[in-house]
Image (cartoon, rainbow, N blue to C red):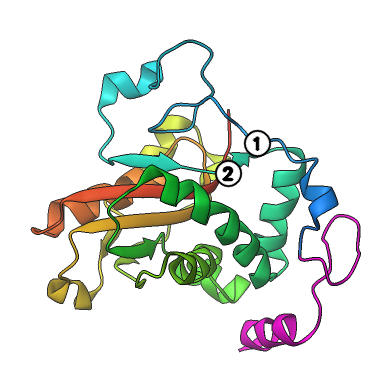
Amino acid sequence: MRHYLDFILDIIFPSRCIFCGRYGLGYVCPECFSKFKIPNKYCRFCGRPLTGISEICYNCTKESPIWSGFEFLGYYDDMWETVIKNLKFRNKPNVAKFIADLAKDKILSKKWDIDFLTYVPLSNKRLVERGYNQSEYLAYFLSKSLKKPYGSLLSLNKEVKPQKTLSLKERKENVKGAFGLVEEVKYLHYRNILIIDDVYTTGSTIKECAYTLKNNIKILDKIYVFVAVRALL
């Protein structure tokens, strides 16, 4: 497939910064990365910005998140938006490596007990159109960084509309019951799973994924979440 050829070419030839265009300094060079906004005070379950002394936002105190930990790199604006668009729509797999390299230190600092990494699946329609799943790219590179196994645990049982076009209520309904387990999951012997996605907005999609895993894998203990960026409505 085309994206595998692009992947090989990205490894053989020097990378080019997606911002300034310089070769050989990575997909985001150090000078351009110094301009990124890095959040430092946010809800530990959803990434919402916080200003007080609390570590949990008001919404998360009300709904008791299903996961034990949440981490991300930045908010979906300016430079982070450019990174995600390159990963998601321009077939730049090594942008996922750049994200994974940054994510490694943040995740290790949390001391999460991770046994296995998985990712949010795409619909067949979008997978055919795009040629790849950007969240799988992220899971692949992050699994190498963390030295943990990864694989597909979730399947999409119905076509869903793009979430960005929907209201909060519509987003929940859109993904309700949309996910199932792949056949091999019945042999799973991992207890603590990290779910990976590219963008978190309302959390409807990844929450549905987490509920599907939690309700169908009996030995499952903890679920953790990593997303590249957090979008704010």
Q: Specify whether residue 156 is in view.
A: no
On the image, the x and y values in percent for residue 157 come to 31, 64
Amino acid at dot 2: Leu
Could you tell me which residue is drawn at 65 percent across and 36 percent down? 38
The secondary structure type at the circle numbered 1 is: loop
**Magenta-colored span:** 1-26
On the image, the x and y values in percent for residue 70 come to 40, 41
Could you tell me which residue is drawn at 38 percent across and 48 percent down? 225
How packed mark 2 is, by other alpha carbons closer than 10 Å (few <14, some 14-19, many 20 or more), is: many
Amino acid at dot 1: Ile
Q: In the drawing, does residue 13 fall left or right of residue 93?
A: right
Between the residue at mark 2 and the residue at mark 1, the CA separation in whole angstroms equals 7 Å
State the residue lying farthest toward the left.
218
Q: Quadrant of the N terminus?
A: bottom right
Residue 73 is marked as 2
On the image, the x and y values in percent for residue 127 come to 53, 72
Q: Which sits in the foreground, 125 or 188?
A: 188
Q: Specify whether residue 205 is in view.
A: yes
Q: Pointer 2 and pointer 1: residues touching (CB < 8 Å)?
A: yes
First-in-chain label (2 vs 1): 1
Q: Is 8 inside the magenta-drawn segment?
A: yes
Above or below for 70 versus 197:
above
Q: Which sits in the foreground, 135 or 146?
A: 146
On the image, the x and y values in percent for residue 98 come to 65, 61
Above or below for 90 versus 103:
below
Q: In the drawing, does residue 200 fall left or right of residue 178?
A: right
Could you tell me which residue is drawn at 61 percent across and 40 percent down? 74
To which residue does mark 1 refer? 38
The secondary structure type at the circle numbered 2 is: loop
